[in-house]
Image: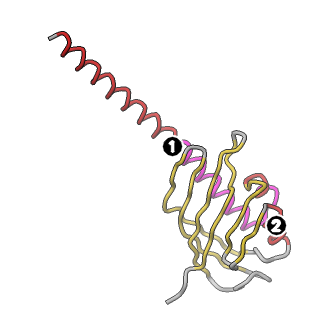
Amino acid sequence: MQQRLRVQLLIVTALAWIGCASAQSTDQNDAVEREIRRLDGAEAGGLLHKDIALLEAIWAEDFTVNNPRNSISRGRDEVVALIRNGTIDYSSLVREIEAILFHGEAVIVMGSETITPIGKAPLAGQTIRRRFTHFWMKRNGEWRLTARHANVICRD
């Protein structure tokens, strides 16, 4: 009888520990999600207002973009150059996060965005809907946008 009671106590303790660990993990993910949403919103604002200093603080040095111009931009400096030369220039940018996936020191954000390019930017004056995926990585204790994929949604 005493052995059975020990086993039951062990099972109850293990289940309680698993429940606490799960709640702690959920709390940690909630905090990370709030931070990633904040950073993602700041990044969108930085693009809209061409705030290079802000973007350089958010983007990893090796930031890589599989862009909707059917090419890959390698490195933060290359993307900054596209902003400076007017290839990336928007009068509006609205981003909607639809999913966030947590993988330790990496977070994947997926969703849609609507932009209105202006000036020398491709498709200037049109309203463009795109799908995007962002890959955030924690580096030296800071979350950095490390990779991005964006594609234009084809019209029917």
Q: Find residue 87 and report its image quarter.
A: bottom right
Q: Find residue 80 and report its image quarter.
A: bottom right
Could you tell me which residue is drawn at 77 percent across and 52 percent down? 57
- In this view, the residue in front, 21 or 35, is 21
On the rendered structure, is 47 left or right of 30? right
**First in sequence: mark 1 vs mark 2:** 1
User: Does residue 155 lie above or below 110 as drawn?
Assistant: below
User: Does residue 141 lie above or below 89 as drawn?
Assistant: above
Q: Nearer the viewer, mark 1 or mark 2?
A: 2
Q: Secondary structure at mark 1?
A: helix
Could you tell me which residue is drawn at 49 percent across and 59 percent down? 99
Task: From the top left corner, tell me how far across and down residue 121 is, in percent.
Answer: 76, 81
Spatial CA span between label 1 and label 2: 32 Å
On the rendered structure, is 131 left or right of 22? right
Residue type, numbered disc 2: Glu
User: Does residue 111 lie above or below 58 as drawn?
Assistant: below
Q: Which residues are magenta?
A: 29-54
Could you tell me which residue is drawn at 67 percent across and 63 percent down? 44
- In this view, the residue in front, 17 or 31, is 17
Q: Which mark is residue 29?
A: 1
Task: From the top left corner, tell me how far across and down residue 68 is, in percent.
Answer: 66, 77
Could you tell me which residue is drawn at 56 percent across and 56 percent down? 108
State the residue position of label 2. Answer: 78
Residue type, numbered disc 1: Asn
